[in-house]
Image (cartoon, rainbow, N blue to C red):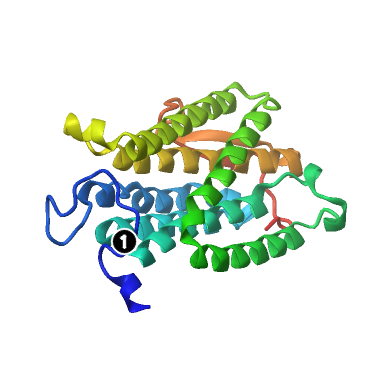
Amino acid sequence: MWSHLERGSSPVDWCESNYSITPMIAEFVNTVSNILFFLLPPVLIHLFQGYAKFFNPAINVLWLLLMVVGLSSAYFHATLSLVGQLLDELAILWVFMAAFATFFPKRYFPSFLGGNRRLLALYASVFSVLSTGFLVMHPKANAFALMTLAVPALVFLCKELKRVKCPRVYRLGLRCVAVSLLAMFCWITDRMFCDAWLYINFPYLHGAWHILIFIASYTALVLYAYFNVSEERPEQKPQLKYWPKNDFELGIPYVTLKHPYKKDNLAI
């Protein structure tokens, strides 16, 4: 058991050379490229204060889980341990399931849920626990399992964008899809064509993946937050804004409510 904590115990080793910059960190660029996972979530928690207070406080759980993903990924790439690999991959799984329980549209709920989002969250939690146990016993299945979640999430995002009437939201959605595809390209080519990148002395595409996938992930969560309140509380009139300047659409997007009001049965 303790051997799984040892450095290099993971069967996964990315293209970046190990311990080439410091003897303390196995993959230096792949480790420090997780910095956005720590810097942006506290800002997003602040920007989503009104959304969390008047509509859905669970949004803050998602921002915190993104920080857990960043911490797990940094630990994995710094040590290349099997435990680090599992923490990294399982943290991503829990983000997927938490987002599913929080934002899945009620119009698609099966009849046995009766429109009850809390019940959906319970089922999602049970599935996450069972999947965690299975993936710990069979870590080679992790990459496949996560990919089967990522592709449908992206397809569903494109489907939801077709319903959007706000051009600003639509433009953000297109950028999110483009960044997601670019992130996938970096992940795949780093994994499959490492020799080519080593030949030109640029084995850092997995580090680029970390930056791009964070941007794509938090942007997708912002969009789903907008879709969620638009469907369940349209009278609150959600608005997509940007920080630090609202007219600069390459800033940090967030959702506010034009007509906020408190309600006892807040969505979870």
Q: Where does the image place residue 17, in percent across and percent down from the top left?
A: 19, 47
**Residue that appears at 73% across and 44% down:** 105
The one nearer the camera, 137 or 161, is 137
Q: Where does the image place residue 34, in percent across and percent down from the top left?
A: 32, 49
Q: Where does the image place residue 223, in percent across and percent down from the top left?
A: 58, 37
Q: How many marks on residues?
A: 1
**Residue that appears at 36% across and 55% down:** 73
**Residue that appears at 51% across and 63% down:** 138
* Residue 205 position (above or below residue 135): above
User: Where does the C terminus fall, quadrant-wise?
Assistant: bottom right
Residue at which label 1 appears: 75
Q: Taking 29 as reference, is 257 left or right?
A: right
Identify residue type, mark 1.
Answer: Tyr
Q: Taking 214 as reference, is 14 left or right?
A: left
Q: Where does the image place residue 125, in percent across and percent down from the top left?
A: 64, 64
Seen as rendered, the residue at the extreme bottom is 2
**Residue that appears at 57% across and 49% down:** 50
Secondary element type, mark 1: helix
User: Where does the N terminus fall, quadrant-wise?
Assistant: bottom left
Residue 77, located in which quarter of the rendered image?
A: bottom left
Q: Is residue 46 visible?
A: yes
Callout 1: 10 Å neighbours few (<14), some, many (20+)? Answer: many
Residue 74, located in which quarter of the rendered image?
A: bottom left
Q: Is residue 264 visible?
A: no
The one nearer the camera, 69 or 146, is 146
